[in-house]
Amino acid sequence: MTDRLYSPWRYPYLVSEKKEGCILCIKPEEDKERLVVYRNKLCFVILNLYPYNNGHVMIVPNRHIANLHDLTSEESIDLFAALSLSEKVIRKQYKPDGLNIGINIGKAAGAGVDEHLHVHIVPRWFGDSNFMTTAANMRVIPEDFENAYSNLIKLFSQSE
């Protein structure tokens, strides 16, 4: 029998009605409502609305592109700078035991939004898959978005 990893807490996203256009093309005036916690010149950091753990953020280029090879050199530098800063902020705020950092390019690779490149950072702790995840098919995220947004936006502004 093949082992399977299920993530039923993400099911609401999969079956939800999708807006016209790209959900990751976010204008600066939408930052607070869309939970953008940081912007540099060419990309931004946003809280994931369907997180795997507390502090799950995504680094997103401003420009609507789907692949790494479509990034300009300047966009690559800004993306990596935001990724590095995000690691620093998440470690400071959440004190995880480790981090998963990844990019899913294309639907077959697991990208929920495959038309706009983004990098995930997921804080991890020893034992973070507990009985709720394994027995009840439910993920417990103890921190609400307002608290996470408030704490992260403050730390990003202090850490530049």
Image (cartoon, grey):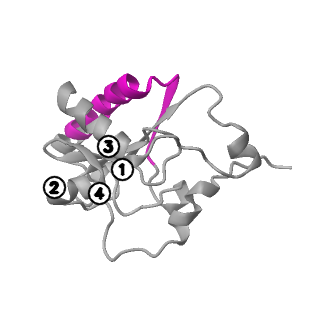
Q: Amino acid at mark 4?
A: Arg
Question: Are the residues tagged 2 and 1 within 8 Å (C-beta)?
Answer: no
2 or 4: tag closer to the N-terminus: 2
4 or 1: tag closer to the N-terminus: 4
Q: Which residue is mark 2?
A: 28
For the question of whether residue 62 can be seen, the reply is: no
Magenta-drawn stretch contains 88: yes
Quarter of the image for the C terminus: give it.
Answer: top left
How far apart are labels 1 and 3 at the CA level?
19 Å
Residue 72, label in figure: none
Label 3's element?
helix
Camera-nearest residue between 156 and 73: 156
Camera-nearest residue between 129 and 6: 129
Give the residue displayed 33% in from the left and 25% down from the top.
Answer: 88
How far apart are labels 4 and 3 at the CA level?
10 Å
How far apart are labels 4 and 1 at the CA level?
15 Å
Residue 66 percent across, percent down from the top left: 34, 58
Q: For the residue carrying disc 3, how many other residues have a C-alpha within 10 Å: few (<14), some (14-19), or many (20+)? A: some
How far apart are labels 3 and 2 at the CA level?
15 Å
Q: Which residue is mark 3?
A: 149
Question: Are the residues tagged 4 and 3 within 8 Å (C-beta)?
Answer: no
Label 1's element?
loop
Dot in front, 4 or 3: 3
Residue 49 percent across, percent down from the top left: 43, 54
Residue 99 percent across, percent down from the top left: 48, 30
1 or 3: tag closer to the N-terminus: 1
